[in-house]
């Protein structure tokens, strides 16, 4: 059986109705501190009341103080607990004070429980519960259910114990009694721990820790730590066990909770015993033994004595081990604690065997086997009872839910009737306001049509701007070179120049034709983008190949200006993009770089590899740009037509076209430039990856 300590809530005194209560409160007479509950203050208050004029034993405040005093005597002076609780019970019945009677019965139940008299304890607990139910005092009802379940646990009637715990837990949750929720949930965890179902026990302990966090009560948390330390020790998780035991000890020492501190020392001794560190185990067991000299807690003392006996056995001090084992055996027999007798019998068997007293060893061995068989049989019955009780409880909850659903169905019928009446009212209201709604709908349609017209107006304006820009480019950049070419041909046709003179103009004509071709290519691409939208068809392309082709194409123009073109693009720079569009971008950027770079300059094209993309750059040693120009070069509706260092003409749409094409290919474009320091245009394209599908 796992060594854990059950929780039993203190019975707090109710608020009195007499003037004396207010006086005693003002003088701090009802101070409460820890398990001992401020008993010197309670005694002084009781004495003062007895000496007051007009004192009566029927005073409910006096009865409450007696019950409070009786509660404080548990684990300290049990005979006083019995005497004071009987007085409180008698006076409560004389005063017809059921609340005091209920508390007195609870105290008497605790007394008989600690003495191992389960029958008497259960009788008193049930009487207290009946009174609590009649009073509709939920706190006392929950407390009596909890104590009754604890007594069934000591008897080994786990089915009744779990059933009582679950009922108490449901009542605590219903009335938001979170302190009792914590206590009962931990006792359920202890129930599973006693069955060595540690996984289920830890599940409930984790729920307890969450409730304790909400309560922000260090004492409740410490009690949980102590029990979890014992569970982890039984599981062999000794580091977890030591952490929880130490966490509880620091709080119990601060709050002076003697009975729980003795238990925590015992848990720590058990941890060292399992580590076979017998000297340390004995040290902590002795600390617990010293505290038990001030306590009257037979049930708690049994495990302590057994632990000391096992420790002395490990230290090969058999005589001392035998003394403690016999003491534990006697207490276990007195309060009918089977598990304690079993542990003692095992220890005494080992001692007798070591002393070569084989007859005595055989006697203890047979007793140990007999008790083990009994416990084993009982444990199996307990396990089955736990499962059965849980199933029955869930079944009862299901039946209750079904009954509630029937009642809800009846309520739904009434609700449906009310909804029908409401629907009729809505229909009448709808008919009344129908004309207003129709008018509103017409207004909304008018607004929609107005917005549609405004949108069309914007689109028409944009188309008109596109048309104007198109004609401006044709007039500015195409008509001039074509007109010059036509005039030269007319001069040749009319014989005003000779063939040799005409041939001198061939380089100039070639340059103009290249310019016209380049401009037309940009113009057609831009026109298609404006009228129909760009259609991007990405595929795996080689950036270094496209750059090489454009450098070759523009090399003559660069040579005429003594400009050096250089490519720093690595081989196999593969990208996933539309090759035709990126070709236009690169050609425009290199052409612009040549255009704005003076003689003997340099234009460099390079690439930097990033994680998912290539960063392409075109750098020149040209005239550069100011910030005002940089802010406008990529704007869609800006028509900036400038002349190069040799008065070369441009279309004014190249960079806006480049921006649109780069963005269509999931990239970005930008520029860094300073006047007279040159410019560097950057753009990005996605890298080619295996997952990209090749286009057919």
Image (tube, rainbow, N blue to C red):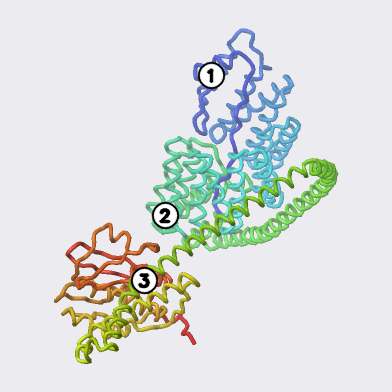
Residue 1 visible here:
no
User: Which residue matches tag 3?
Assistant: 475
**Local crowd size for mark 2, using a 10 Å CA cut-off: few (<14), some (14–19), many (≥20):** many
Rendered location of residue 679, percent (x, y): 23, 67
In the depicted view, which residue is nearer to us: 161 or 289? Answer: 161
Q: Which mark is residue 25?
A: 1
Callout 3: SS: helix
In the depicted view, which residue is nearer to us: 416 or 647? Answer: 647
Question: Compared with residue 382, is residue 58 higher up or lower down, i.e. above or below?
Answer: above
User: Which residue matches tag 2?
Assistant: 272
- Measuring 44% from the left and 73% from the top, which residue is drawn there? 527
Question: Compared with residue 516, is residue 315 higher up or lower down, i.e. above or below?
Answer: above
Q: Which circle, 1 or 2, is nearer the viewer?
A: 1
Q: Is residue 508 left or right of residue 315?
A: left
Q: Which mark is residue 435?
A: none
Q: Which circle, 3 or 2, is nearer the viewer?
A: 3
Q: Are marks 3 and 1 in contact (CB under 8 Å)?
A: no
If you read the primary sequence from the N terminus, does the residue marked by circle 1 or circle 2 appear first? 1
- Measuring 41% from the left and 59% from the top, which residue is drawn there? 276
Question: Compared with residue 442, is residue 670 higher up or lower down, i.e. above or below?
Answer: below
In the depicted view, which residue is nearer to us: 134 or 314? Answer: 134
If you read the primary sequence from the N terminus, does the residue marked by circle 3 or circle 1 appear first? 1
């Amino acid at each position: 059986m796992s060594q854990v300590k059950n929780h039993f809530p203190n019975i707090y005194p109710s608020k009195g109705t007499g003037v004396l209560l207010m006086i005693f409160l003002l003088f701090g007479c009802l101070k409460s501190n820890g398990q001992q509950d401020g008993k010197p203050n309670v005694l002084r208050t009781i004495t003062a009341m007895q000496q007051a004029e007009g004192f009566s034993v029927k005073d409910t405040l006096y009865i409450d103080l007696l019950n409070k005093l009786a509660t404080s005597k548990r684990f300290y002076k049990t005979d006083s607990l019995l005497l004071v609780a009987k007085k409180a019970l008698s006076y409560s019945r004389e005063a017809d004070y059921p609340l005091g009677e209920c508390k007195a019965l609870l105290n008497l139940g605790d007394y008989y429980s600690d003495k191992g008299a389960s029958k008497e304890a259960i009788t008193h607990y049930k009487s207290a519960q009946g009174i609590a139910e009649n009073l509709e005092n939920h706190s006392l009802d929950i407390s009596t259910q909890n104590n009754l379940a604890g007594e069934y646990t000591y008897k080994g009637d786990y089915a009744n114990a779990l059933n009582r715990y679950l009922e108490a837990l449901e009542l605590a949750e219903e009335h938001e009694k979170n302190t009792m929720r914590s206590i009962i949930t931990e006792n359920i965890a202890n129930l599973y721990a006693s069955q060595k179902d540690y996984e289920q026990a830890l599940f409930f302990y984790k729920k307890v820790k969450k409730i304790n966090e909400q309560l922000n009560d260090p004492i409740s948390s410490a009690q949980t730590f102590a029990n979890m330390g014992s569970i982890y020790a039984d599981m062999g998780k000794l580091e977890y066990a030591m952490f929880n035991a130490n966490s509880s000890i620091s709080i119990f020492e601060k709050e002076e909770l003697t009975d729980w501190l003795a238990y925590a020392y015992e848990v720590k001794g058990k941890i060292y015993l399992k580590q076979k560190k017998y000297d340390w185990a004995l040290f902590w067991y002795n600390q617990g033994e010293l505290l038990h000299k001030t306590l009257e807690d037979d049930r708690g003392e049994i495990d302590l004595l057994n632990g000391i006996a096992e420790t002395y056995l490990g230290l090969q001090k058999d005589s001392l081990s035998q003394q403690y084992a016999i003491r534990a055996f006697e207490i276990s027999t007195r309060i009918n604690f089977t598990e304690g007798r079993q542990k003692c019998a095992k220890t005494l068997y080992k001692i007798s065997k070591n002393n070569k007293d084989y007859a005595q060893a055989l006697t203890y061995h047979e007793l140990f086997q007999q008790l083990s068989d009994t416990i084993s049989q009982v444990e199996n019955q307990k396990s089955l009872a736990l499962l059965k009780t849980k199933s029955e409880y869930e079944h009862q909850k299901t039946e209750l839910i079904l009954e509630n659903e029937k009642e809800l169905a009846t309520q739904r019928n009434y609700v449906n009737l009310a909804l029908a009446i409401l629907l009729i009212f809505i229909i009448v209201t709808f008919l009344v306001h129908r004309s207003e709604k129709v008018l509103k709908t017409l207004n909304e349609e008018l607004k929609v049509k107005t917005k549609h017209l405004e949108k069309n107006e914007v689109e028409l304006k944009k188309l008109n701007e596109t048309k104007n820009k198109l004609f401006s480019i044709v007039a500015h950049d195409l008509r001039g070179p074509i007109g010059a070419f036509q005039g030269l041909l007319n001069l040749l046709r009319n014989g005003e120049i000779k063939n040799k003179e005409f041939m001198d103009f061939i380089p100039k004509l070639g340059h103009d034709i290249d310019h016209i071709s380049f401009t037309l290519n940009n113009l057609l691409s831009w026109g298609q983008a404006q009228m129909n939208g760009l259609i991007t068809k990405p595929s795996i392309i080689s950036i270094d190949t496209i750059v090489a082709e454009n450098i070759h194409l523009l090399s003559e123009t660069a040579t005429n200006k003594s400009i050096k073109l250089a490519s720093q693009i690595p081989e196999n720079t593969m990208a996933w993009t539309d090759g035709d569009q990126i070709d236009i971008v690169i050609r425009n950027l290199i052409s612009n770089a040549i255009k704005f770079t003076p003689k003997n300059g340099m234009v460099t094209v390079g690439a930097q590899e990033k994680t998912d993309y290539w960063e392409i750059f075109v750098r020149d040693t040209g005239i550069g740009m100011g910030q005002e120009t940089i802010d406008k070069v990529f704007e869609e509706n800006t028509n900036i037509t400038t002349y190069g260092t040799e008065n070369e003409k441009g279309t004014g749409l190249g960079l806006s076209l480049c921006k649109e094409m780069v963005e269509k290919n999931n990239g970005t474009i930008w520029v860094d430039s300073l006047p007279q320091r040159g410019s560097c245009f950057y753009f990005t394209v996605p890298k080619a990856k295996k997952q990209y599908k090749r286009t057919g």
